[in-house]
Amino acid sequence: MKILVVDDDQDIVELLSIYIKNEGYEPIKAYDGKEAMTKLATNPDTALMILDIMMPNMDGMEVVREVRKDSQIPVLMLSAKTTDMDKIKGLISGADDYVSKPFNPLEVMARVKSLLRRSQHQVTNDTPDVLEVGPLVIKKDSHEVTTLTGQQIQLTALEFGILYLLASHPNRVYSADEIFERVWQQESIVSAKTVMVHVSHLRDKIEEATNGEKVIQTVWGVGYKVEVH
């Protein structure tokens, strides 16, 4: 399984590559955004990307936006920026998770494993293979979401996980903590804003494809649900 590591600090690339090898994965190295895009193009089977934000030639935000045009590869962002707004911008751009520098490589690898597990086993086997909720058709096995007219909606693994969780339990309200623990498959750690950003991005995609249909409802002070009458 290949993991692309992208950072203009060569020491960080080498350090993470050592840990990636020790876990049995194959590291691919890049030192700026343009090189990252080239490496992805020549290694289409790459399973995950670890991506710095501040880089020359093409920053991490630009890379994620380009990648998300035709790929749902899990992306873990690294950055020396630590404010909530910087994290939110990274997640809105299409990243799946975020680690601030300086970081513990063991934490990075724990996040990597979690993202890989989620991308491979996004939903449990005791849920229906196909769901129809409002204007949407959701297919578990292929991770596809389409409108009733057949228009495909491109979602990240996290966005699909959130939608499927809510849609497979209609009218049930899930708190941000519950969503984080079930979809991210980690214990909830300051998860509310992270979940909020992903739900907002998911809503935007659904509403754009369905002429403004409000599929996901917010229950203020409680959480989120898909309402079915």
Image (cartoon, rainbow, N blue to C red):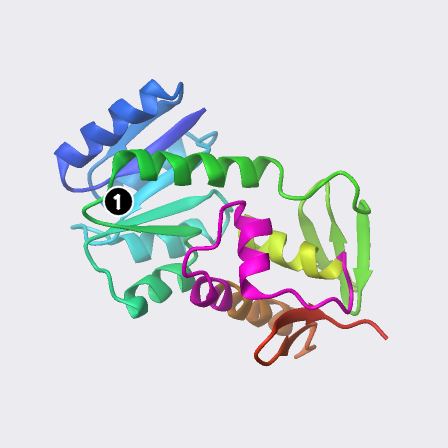
Q: Is residue 136 left or right of residue 4?
A: right
- The image shows residue 46, relative to residue 168, as above or below, that is above
Q: Quadrant of residue 84?
A: bottom left
Q: Circle 1 sits on which residue?
A: 34
Q: Which residues are magenta?
A: 168-197
Residue at 38% in and 31% down: 3
Can you see residue 212? yes
Residue at position x 74%, y 54% in the image: 138
Q: Residue at x 51, y 46 (%)?
A: 72
**Where residue 194 appears, x then y in whole percent?**
44, 62
56 magenta-colored? no
Q: List x then y, in percent, for residue 216.
A: 66, 71
Tag 1, which secondary structure? helix
- Total labels: the figure holds 1
Q: Nearer the viewer, residue 165 or 157?
A: 165
Q: Amino acid at mark 1?
A: Lys
Q: Quadrant of the N terminus?
A: top left
Q: Is residue 1 above or below residue 220?
A: above
For image coordinates 86% across by 75% down, the residue present is 229
The vertical placement of 208 against 180, above or below, is below
**As drawn, is 124 to the left or to the right of 202?**
right
Coordinates of residue 117 in the picture (x, y in percent): 54, 35
Q: Nearer the viewer, residue 222 or 149?
A: 222
Residue 177 on the magenta segment: yes
Query: In the figure, residue 4 lies in which quadrant?
Result: top left
> Residue 133: x percent and y percent?
79, 64
